[in-house]
Image (spheres, grey):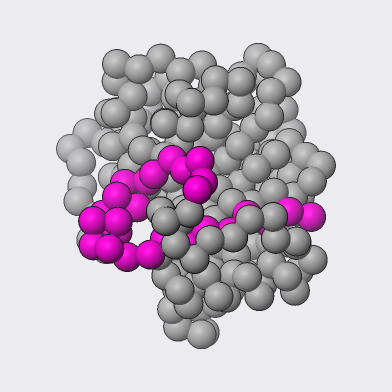
Amino acid sequence: MRLKNVKGAKEIIEASSYIIKEPERFKGNYKKIFGNDNEIHVEIGMGKGDFIIKMAQKYPNINFIGIEMFDSVIVRAIQKLKDIELDNLKLIRFDATNIEEIFKKEIDTVYLNFSDPWPKNRHEHRRLTSHRFLEKYDSIFKENNHIIQKTDNRKLFEFSIISYIDYGYKIKNISLNLHEDDYDNVETEYEKKFISLKYPIYMIEVYK
């Protein structure tokens, strides 16, 4: 996917009250940022923010953090938040490959929405559901590990199911066509596109 540069993106990001600067400083103490002991849910690869913003609006008693590594993408989420005040939402511009450097035993749920499938076998360790990443998540979950994943990519979905089970996760919910099943679902921007193209959306919720 070719990303379009946004003029003044760095300045917009720097000025936003939603951005957590130097997130490493808050490792293990993100409740200080939110000023409460509510659950903290993280979306890794939040894209332009549709999902995380709607979730924060829908569930005001849960704290949400969206992580995105590209300036040209996260700035779009900030622009959507221009006239919105959400005390339970923060954003981090960061490469999730090093997620264990910014969180420690404080996250309750991780969302993986339409992550890059990295289709070549030699790149499978880059997939956000590979054992490499599942091991990293162990260090960030507060008590019980809890992951909710959505994807349009069947190969990634199959890989993820095997990876979760091999790593000791149990399946709580699973759908092979999310929009034909009865789930309380908040859509992402990618999801809307795939639905319009009649693609099935795969969902799995796991815990351990």
The answer to whether 99 appears left or right of 19 in the picture is: right
The residue depicted at 50 percent of the width and 41 percent of the height is 184
State which quadrant residue 53 falls in: top left
Q: Does the image show residue 44?
A: no
15 or 175: nearer the eye? 175
The residue depicted at 18 percent of the width and 37 percent of the height is 7
The answer to whether 43 appears left or right of 199 in the picture is: right
The vertical placement of 144 against 28, above or below, is: below
Whole-percent x and y of residue 168?
79, 66
| Quadrant of the drawing holding the C terminus | bottom right
Whole-percent x and y of residue 141?
74, 45
The answer to whether 91 appears left or right of 133 in the picture is: left
Residue, far bottom: 121
82 or 177: nearer the eye? 177
- Check if residue 189 falls in the magenta segment: yes
The residue depicted at 77 percent of the width and 39 percent of the height is 142
Magenta residues, start to end: 182-208
The vertical placement of 168 against 10, above or below, is: below
The answer to whether 144 appears left or right of 17 in the picture is: right
Whole-percent x and y of residue 139?
76, 50
Q: Does the image show residue 65?
A: yes
State which quadrant residue 193 falls in: bottom left
6 or 44: nearer the eye? 44
| Quadrant of the drawing holding the N terminus | bottom left
202 or 26: nearer the eye? 202
Whole-percent x and y of residue 19?
45, 28
The residue depicted at 59 percent of the width and 27 percent of the height is 63
